[in-house]
Amino acid sequence: MVLVDIFALVTAVLSFLAVYGAAQRCLSGFITATCQLRTNPSTENPSGPITGTVTFSQRVTATCRRLGTLCMHVQVQGLPQNVDNHYGLHVHESADLRNGCESFGPHYNPLGSNHGGPTDSLDMRHMGDFGNLRLNSRGDVDVTLTDYLANLSGNNGIIRRGLVLHAMRDDLGLGGIPASLTTGNSGARLACCEILQT
């Protein structure tokens, strides 16, 4: 009898903390996250190490339900030049770094869609298909992006998942080859990081 009462009390306390904790995280009306990009150890980069920071913010309710688009500020240094200086950026299923960026798995695709571009409808793109980054005149990336589909919180949230910067331009699913519909044919994984709530 006493054990049952203790179990019920512990369950009630944990439930309260789960709800109250979620509300506390979003009382400001925003949820934020960051990702510290680092060079993939299994990919050679002749121009040296790749470093960068991606900061995310999204307007939400006090209980972390989405109210607005996802905003991303992306800063990257050390990218090697490619044919047109465009680089695909995608969310992957995991952030498992045991084998560098290679162990991040495929693109995060909870809706089971083909790969596409950031402006495509939800049945024509993956959750984290963020399109391409482009080098600026200084040879680095400093850009702000928005995305209508991806969420930081909720069942399909991207927090604790991996973000990968690829070696080539993402063809946005329009390349006419099988890889276009899975990865955008965007090449090797140059750098990656785990998306962590701040």
Image (cartoon, helix red, strand yellow):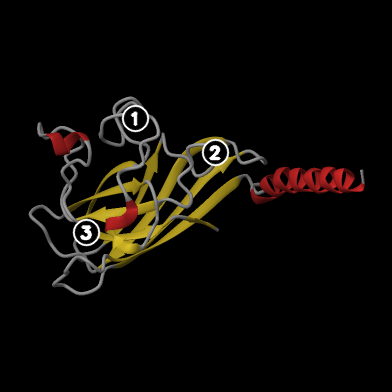
Element assignment for label 1: loop
Q: Is residue 16 above or below residue 65?
A: below
Of circles 1 and 3, the one toward us is 1
Q: Is residue 116 above or below residue 48?
A: above
Q: Which residue is mark 2?
A: 154
- Find residue 102 and report its horizontal and vertical position in percent: 27, 57
The amino acid on which the numbered mark 2 sits, given as a three-letter code, is: Gly
Tell me the residue at 25%/73% (across/down): 49
Given residues 94 and 69, the one toward you in this image is 94
The amino acid on which the numbered mark 1 sits, given as a three-letter code, is: Gly
Q: Which residue is mark 1?
A: 112
The amino acid on which the numbered mark 3 sits, given as a three-letter code, is: Asn
Evaluate if marks 1 and 2 touch, with contact meaning CB atoms under 8 Å apart. Answer: no
Evaluate if marks 1 and 3 touch, with contact meaning CB atoms under 8 Å apart. Answer: no
Label 2 Cα neighbours within 10 Å, binned few <14 / some 14-19 / many ≥20: few
Label 3 Cα neighbours within 10 Å, binned few <14 / some 14-19 / many ≥20: few
- Find residue 153 and report its horizontal and vertical position in percent: 54, 42
- Residue 143 appearing in the image: no
